[in-house]
Image (cartoon, rainbow, N blue to C red):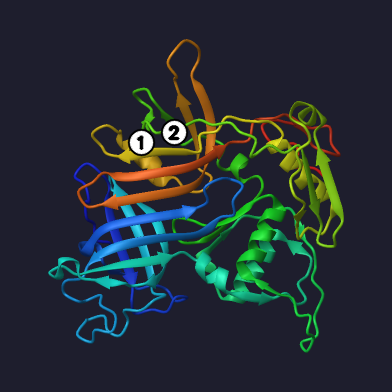
Amino acid sequence: MAIWAKPHPLGPEISVDWSPTTDPDATPVWASLTSRVREYHARLYRQTELDEFQTGEFAVVLDNRDRELEPGYTGSSHSPNVLPRKRMRVQARHNAITYDRVGGFIRTLPISWPGQLDAIVAVSAADYGMALNRAQVTLNSYPEELAHTRIGRVLDAVGVPAGDRDLDTSDHMCAAIDALDATSSNQQTVGALEHCRQAALSDGGYLFVARDGAITFHNRAHRRDVLGTPAGTLGDLPGEIPYQPSLVGQMDDSRLWNRAAVLTADGTREEASDSTSEGAYWPSRRDDFQSLLARPGEAAALASLFVWRYKDARLRFPTVESLLVSSHMATAHIAALLAADVGTRFTVKRRPPGAGSAISQDVHVDGIQEDVVRGQPWQLSLDVSPADPDTDFWVLGTSTLQTGASPAVVGY
């Protein structure tokens, strides 16, 4: 059972646990560190939708005046298990509801003695991305298979338990990889994380480690079909989720492409372009993407998706910051922010001085930063990107008109 502490009287509660007696791939046996917590900081996922999802990292500053968390100290009740790679998790609780914050594995346990009378351990930890980034797999006799099956195959090879993964079903096929002679010098050994990422991107989806610590794959249609309804409105009027005055809107050409090419696994090149955008902005090309796709039609659809999404300049609100303090934020607002994870949809509203309508934009969460210090408000920062515009499109090979999705999501 989790033990809870309240870093700030008007904010959520926090719980920090670790599993010192189990190996990284075993079912954890949680022991509480909550009473020792002085600070918690986390940086998860990616800053913009064009970046790769990074290994989530978090740090917890813990009281260690009794030496219980001192590595190598034989007088500790945890000896000899104060070691790297032990599991750790952070949770929040608000209004009797528990929210996962981050889960992962300890990397470092630096100890220090501020002022000679104090003692702390500033634990640094990382999510499953750390293990995948260091693991390698040999691509030998992989069949043609759907992207989520390929990701699962790699996770099996690395030894990730089935309970630590959550994979959408893909509709797109990764190409087969020929059987290799075990004595060959041409063994195809690749990074596990990179191959999983490439499979996810080949689908038009993305791979990340969710708040609960599970390796997660969202397919191309997930944001449309599952995360299409905003979880709330981040705005500047009463009744909306309040954000900090640091909100900045920006428009530039760093995410402007009207030409794209995708290569299939065997090197077949499929291109897409938009002549209207080329006339308005000059031709702007996205670098060729080397996919794992087996079929040229699927590569062409992925190139069309890139162009459709980035052919027009759009106003963006890169970062939205909030303080989770109940004195100026409703219970439902705090709940919506604590529940946010990759892909969660919000509406951002800004009402500038002067006449005219409000600026309103639906966005999806791409990155999250949290900072919790005892005695200070819980700080939450969301890195967001614009949601895809609703578009009517024809399903190829039928007479059906669909509404509210990209023209590249279905039909090839």
Q: As drawn, is 290 to the left or to the right of 7? A: right
Q: In the image, what residue type sits under mark 1?
A: His
Image quarter hosting the C terminus: top right
What residue appears at the point 44 percent right and 45 percent down from the top-left corner? 340
Residue at image mark 1: 333
Quarter of image, res 407: top right
Query: Does residue 356 show up?
Result: yes
The relative height of residue 219 versus residue 111 in the rendered view (above or below) is above
What residue appears at the point 22 percent right and 52 percent down from the top-left corner? 374
Q: As drawn, is 371 to the left or to the right of 209? A: left
State the residue lying farthest toward the bottom: 183
How busy is the neighbourhood of tag 1: few (under 14 within 10 Å), some, or many (20 plus)? Answer: many
Question: At which x and y percent is residue 326?
Answer: 25, 37
What residue appears at the point 33 percent right and 67 percent down from the top-left corner? 123
Residue at image mark 2: 232
Quarter of image, res 405: top right
Label at residue 200: none
Q: As drawn, is 94 to the left or to the right of 262? A: left
State the residue lying farthest toward the left: 117
Q: As drawn, is 123 to the left or to the right of 395? A: left
Alpha carbon separation for disc pair 2 and 1: 8 Å
Q: Earlier in the sequence, mark 2 or mark 1?
A: 2
Element carrying mark 1: helix
The relative height of residue 17 versus residue 387 in the rendered view (above or below) is below
Mark 2 and mark 1 in contact? Answer it, CB < 8 Å: yes
Question: At which x and y percent is residue 180?
Answer: 80, 81
Quarter of image, res 281: top right
What residue appears at the point 30 percent right and 33 percent down from the top-left corner? 330
Q: In the image, what residue type sits under mark 2?
A: Gly
Question: At which x and y percent is residue 349?
Answer: 46, 26
